[in-house]
Image (cartoon, rainbow, N blue to C red):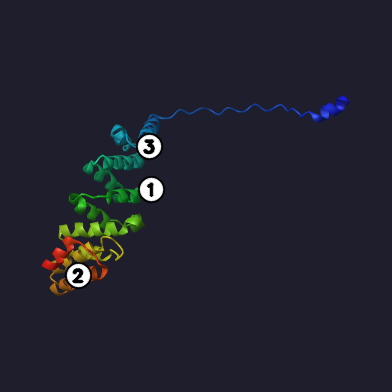
Amino acid sequence: VTKDTIAAALPELKTLNRLSEKPFKELSPSQQSMLTALILYNKGDRCQSVLGLFDELSKDQRFGNEATFLLGTCAARLKMRSLSFERLSSLVRSENKEFGADAISILIQDLPAEYEVPFSKVIRELKDRKLIPAAGTDEVHYLTAKGAFKEGDYQEARTYAERVVESSPRYGNAQFLVGLSWYSLGNTTKAIGRLDALRQWMTSKGVVDKNLNSLTAIN
């Protein structure tokens, strides 16, 4: 074995260029606050602890929309209905493309009766209908119809109630609302026809709903 043979078998060592160090940029106070809030939020049970942080961050130009959405979400988890509706509905009103649809999805989950009218107004004023989540379309239409009816806008109530498809759990209630809307609009014939059709539909489908059965029987 010669020196040349040994040298050929050994790996060639190269001098590596010194890595250039990039300047370190510290997080801004708002970035630090957002990071802290997100860490706590993602733990799942710390909403009470981050409400204040999200409230402050909702005023921040960079994190405002995200913080508003997370604040509304936390408020919903904590059953703080007023705060939740206020923050989430603001994202829908502004037609926020990033958080608007998710805000609607949270709002329609167990929406309290006292918020049906304001919710209906928000949806009826919505220009970008793509913000309405596909999975919640029927619920949105039904709640919008209820709010419009309570407000006395029976034509809008009928229009939105008609949009609830037959496969939806809300179909029976929506059809009843259509009948009531026709009655309130002064068209007794269409009102009675719709309620009769609803009774027949419930019988043919084997739908058992004591409230609807009682209401359609009375009307």
CA distance separating discs 1 and 3: 19 Å
Whether residue 170 sits left or right of residue 114 in the image: it is right
CA distance separating discs 3 and 2: 48 Å
CA distance separating discs 1 and 2: 42 Å
Disc 3, disc 2: CB below 8 Å?
no
Give the mark nearest the N terminus, 1 or 3.
3
- Quarter of the image where one finds residue 8: top right
Give the mark nearest the N terminus, 3 or 2.
3
- Name the residue: 22% across, 70% down: 203
Q: Which one is in front, 219 or 206?
A: 206
Amino acid type at circle 3 is: Asn
Q: Which one is in front, 3 or 12?
A: 3
> Can you tell which mark lies on residue 42?
3
- Name the residue: 26% across, 68% down: 205
Disc 1 versus disc 2: nearer the observer: 2
Give the mark nearest the N terminus, 1 or 2.
1
Where in the figure is residue 130, as x and y percent of width and height?
36, 57
Q: Which residue is mark 2?
A: 199
Element under disc 1: loop
Whether residue 23 sits left or right of residue 121 in the image: it is right
